[in-house]
């Protein structure tokens, strides 16, 4: 049976996005089954407009140049790659209701679910991560 | 240095993690079992990443050559049943038996039928390299009366080589089992 990687993304900055999507794409490329549960500010990472302009942490704006120089792929690119490799993207229904967001507000191909949707996947995961 | 023969060269120069791994995975999916890929990367983390990736996917990491800032990683695509293949050649020898005969400096020939990239990075000193796919065309390089110990990684390809050699009139041919995957004797590379 293949390795299962379960990730919770609950923060909405650019650093958070890289942590989440780098681990997710590397895992998927290593034949792992990956699911990410996006909740609270983590929803920014898959929001149609927001994920293209994620903020750097206050005081760390100068790293924008470093990302360019290291030739790190942009977040939209990483997200598309993750989905192409079969990473399951689950948006948290409860947070969406609180923030008044609809499924159409997010990139195509996501699932919407509650905590149990994630738990069902994560219960036998080999790796569980929270960002 | 030996020329390392590969089926594909993948350019990951200038790419940061996780791109070298993602691209390697995609390229590997297109290869046939047994084929060898050279992954060129400048990301220093790719050295450890590629090795970890191979361990987790079951593909074979052969080695890495560094040329300045450029890392050239060599990987061979495994087939799912590689270690389980049925063995048919009746004459076999254990790794230990071969090692003892080597240490006794007896007059034997070791034939290594793995791909040249595998041979380049890890081989028994003095072993002759003829990849299985080229064996039939290169039989002339071997003497039918010689005592041959045939090695590969797990004993599967060498078994096929032994059968081929036996059918061509080679009398003293032994398949070394398992072969390089568990070889503890002396080795050399590049």
Image (cartoon, rainbow, N blue to C red):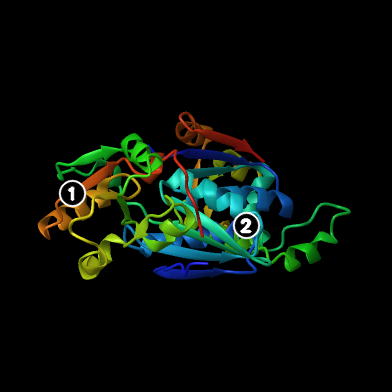
Residue B179 spot, x, y in % from top left: 34, 43
Secondary structure at numbered mark 1: loop
Residue B111 spot, x, y in % from top left: 31, 55
Find the residue positioned furthest to the top: A123
Disc 1: host chain: B
- The residue at which mark 2 appears reads as B17
Is residue A101 something that shows in the picture? Answer: no
Quarter the C terminus of chain A occupies: top right
Q: Nearer the viewer, residue B143 or A4?
A: B143
Spatial CA span between label 1 and label 2 = 51 Å
- The residue at which mark 1 appears reads as B172
Residue located 62% across and 57% down the image: B17
Crowd around label 2: few <14 · some 14–19 · many ≥20 (10 Å): many
Residue located 15% across and 45% down the image: B89
Residue located 78% across and 63% down the image: A66
Q: Nearer the viewer, residue B55 or A28?
A: B55
Secondary structure at numbered mark 2: loop
Relative placement, left or right, of A3 versus B49 is: left
């Amino acid at each position: 049976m293949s390795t299962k990687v379960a990730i919770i993304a609950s923060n909405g900055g650019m650093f958070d996005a890289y942590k989440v999507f780098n681990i997710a794409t590397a895992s998927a490329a290593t034949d792992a089954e990956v699911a990410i549960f996006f909740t609270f500010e983590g929803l920014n990472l898959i929001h149609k407009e927001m994920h293209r302009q994620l903020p750097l942490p206050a005081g760390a704006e100068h790293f924008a140049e470093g990302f360019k120089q290291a030739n790190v792929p942009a977040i939209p690119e990483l997200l598309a790659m993750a989905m192409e490799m079969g990473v399951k993207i689950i948006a948290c229904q409860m947070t969406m209701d609180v923030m008044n967001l609809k499924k159409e507000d997010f990139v195509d191909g996501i699932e919407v679910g509650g905590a149990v949707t994630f738990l069902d996947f994560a219960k036998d995961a080999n790796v569980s991560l929270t960002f | 240095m030996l020329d390392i023969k590969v089926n594909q060269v993948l350019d990951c120069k200038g790419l940061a993690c996780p791109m070298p791994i993602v691209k390697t995975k995609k390229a590997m999916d297109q290869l046939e079992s047994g084929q060898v890929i050279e992954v060129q990367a400048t990301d220093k983390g790719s050295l450890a990443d590629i090795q970890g990736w191979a361990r987790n996917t079951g593909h074979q990491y052969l080695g890495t050559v560094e040329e300045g800032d450029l890392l050239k990683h060599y990987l061979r695509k495994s087939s799912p049943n590689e270690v389980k293949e049925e063995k048919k050649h009746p004459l076999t020898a254990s790794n230990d038996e071969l090692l003892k005969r080597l240490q006794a400096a007896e007059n034997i020939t070791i034939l290594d039928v793995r791909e040249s990239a595998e041979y380049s990075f890890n081989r028994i000193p003095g072993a002759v390299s003829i990849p299985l796919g080229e064996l039939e065309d290169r039989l002339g390089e071997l003497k039918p009366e010689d005592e041959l110990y045939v090695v590969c990684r797990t004993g599967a390809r060498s078994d096929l080589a032994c059968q081929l050699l036996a059918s061509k009139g080679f009398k003293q041919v032994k398949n070394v089992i398992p072969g390089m995957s568990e070889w503890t004797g002396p080795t050399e590379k590049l």
